[in-house]
Amino acid sequence: MHIAIVEDNKDEQLKLQKYITDYCSKEQMSIEVSGYDDGIEIIDHYSGNYDLIYFDIEMPIMDGMTAAKKVRNFDKNVTIVFLTNYIQFASDG
C-alpha cells in the first residue's frame, strides 16, 4: 500500500507517519509512506500511484481541498482523508 501525507506542519506529518507505520508493522502490512509539505507538491508529482492520501485542509500555497479536487480529476479511485482542527471545514470534506 502506498500512502501520501500532505501536511505543512512537519511535526504533525511525522507523527501521523509514525502512527501509520506502527500500526502497519503490528498488522504485518507492507506500506510505503511519502510526505509532502503542501498541496502543490503532490499535484506537481502525482502519477496515480497512491492508494490513500491524507490532506491537511489548511496549507499556505495550495490547500488540501483544492489539491484533492485536482487529484480527483485524474484519479477517481484513490481514498482521500482530510485532516483538520476546524469544524467549519468538516462538512466540505
Image (spheres, grey):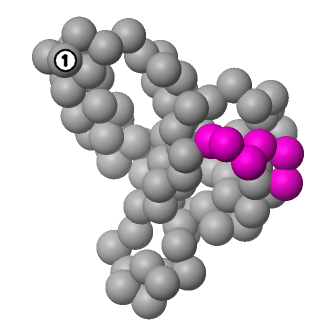
Is residue 84 rendered to the left or right of residue 39? left
> Relative to 58, is 46 above or below?
above
Dot 1 amino acid type? Glu
Disc 1, SS: loop
Q: Position of residue 72 (x, y in %)?
A: 76, 54
Q: Residue at x 62, y 42 (%)?
A: 78
**Chief secondary structure of the magenta span?**
loop
Please identify the quarter of the rendering in which residue 64 is found. Answer: bottom right
Is residue 75 rendered to the left or right of residue 1? right
Q: Position of residue 32 (x, y in %)?
A: 47, 17
Does residue 9 show up?
yes
Q: Residue at x 39, y 42 (%)?
A: 13
Q: Which residues are magenta?
A: 73-78
Q: Which residue was labeled with disc 1?
A: 27
Residue 62 counted in the magenta span: no
Q: Residue at x 64, y 67 (%)?
A: 65
Q: How many marks?
A: 1
Please identify the quarter of the rendering in which residue 70 is found. Answer: bottom right
Front residue (pair 63, 88): 88
> Relative to 66, is 75 above or below?
above
Front residue (pair 45, 47): 47
Please identify the quarter of the rendering in which residue 29 is found. Answer: top left
Q: Position of residue 62 (x, y in %)?
A: 71, 62
Does residue 6 show up?
no
